[in-house]
Image (cartoon, helix red, strand yellow):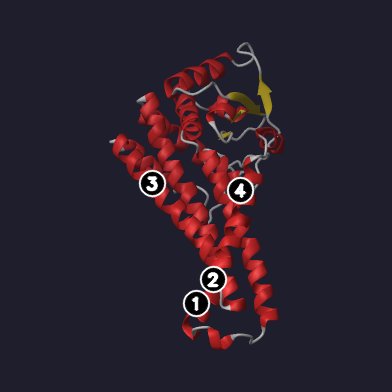
Amino acid sequence: MFHIQIARNKRKTVFLVALFIVFVLLIGAAITYVRAGDYVSGAIFAAVIAGGYTIFMISTSTNVVMRMNHAREITSSTEQPFLWHTVEGLAIAARIPMPRIFIIQDKSPNAFATGISPKSGAVAVTSGLMERLSREEIEGVLAHEVAHIRNYDIRLSTIAVALVSAIAILSDLGMRFFVFSGGRNKDNKHPLILIIAIFLVLLSPLVATMMQLAISRNREYLADASAVELTRNPVALASALETITNTRIPVEEASSSTASLYFADPLKKKAASLFSTHPPPEERIKRLRNM
């Protein structure tokens, strides 16, 4: 069952990322079409902006994210023997280098992974996770985070953030072009295409954010399925998710910029699922219990 889910989630992610890239190019094309009746140069410009911003985001160090969450690195198995050996065993099972391990002093149980490749992977857990969950549940959560590293999810989410940022820049430029272009070159533009282009630029930040969140939610399902592949224990992961979700205390060290990295929503927001960084926990639990 989980093999089928993994394959389905991978196909869906590829489709979403491809759609995201096409959307970026369309925004660039729309801007220069409205400005000068030319769409090719805009698409090229958008590709350059998105590519440059993506490279900048990917080059950001794992240490930056850990500092933002006030995480302390565990450098020896003597500090947290169970945590250390569990991560080590899961890394061996996933066939990736052992990730660096960090702990966050926070009562709310949660965890996250970062690193743009398995070689630079890192896992962080809160002290609340180690205190409130059983060993099998902790192993399930850690397997989920190791799966994120193995599946290159952090790189993917970084690219999605970069594309959203690029679209925000392009949208702002587009609005400026619209204001200063006036009515120039209207004879060279099809009225319907012109209207579509303007609406595309106006709505692009909202659409881009929704696409980013859709990718993020899909990767959570994939990490759940991959974790079960590593542990063969979907019940423990479902139980861990229930415990973490039912804990109403937010992670004090978490922020909106890093919330999407966590195993479950660390801010404990009750936002509409369309704008949530995580899938509904009820749906994740249902899928896990049906494996």
Residue 181 shown left or right of residue 203 in the figure: right
Q: Earlier in the sequence, mark 3 or mark 4?
A: 4
Q: Amino acid at mark 3?
A: Glu
Crowd tier of the residue under label 3, counting other residues whose Cα lies within 10 Å: few below 14, some 14–19, many 20 or above: few
Please, what secondary structure does the residue beneath circle 1 have?
helix
| Rendered position, 206 above or below 244 | below
Crowd tier of the residue under label 2, counting other residues whose Cα lies within 10 Å: few below 14, some 14–19, many 20 or above: some
Q: Amino acid at mark 4?
A: Thr
Which mark lies nearer to you, 3 or 1? 1
Residue, disc 4: 54
Residue, disc 3: 283
Q: Give the alpha-carbon distance from disc 3 to disc 4, as whole Å.
A: 32 Å
Q: Quadrant of the C terminus?
A: top left
Where residue 96 sits: x, y (%)? 49, 24
Where residue 45 sits: x, y (%)? 61, 62
Q: Earlier in the sequence, mark 4 or mark 2?
A: 2
For residue 50, what is the image quadrant?
bottom right
Residue 198 shown left or right of residue 177 in the figure: left
Q: Give the alpha-carbon distance from disc 1 to disc 4, as whole Å.
A: 27 Å
Residue, disc 2: 39
Q: Give the alpha-carbon distance from disc 2 to disc 3, as whole Å.
A: 42 Å
Residue, disc 1: 196
Q: Give the alpha-carbon distance from disc 4 to disc 2, as whole Å.
A: 22 Å
| Residue in the foreground of this view, choosing between 265 and 66 | 66
Regarding residue 261, the answer to whether it shows in the image is yes
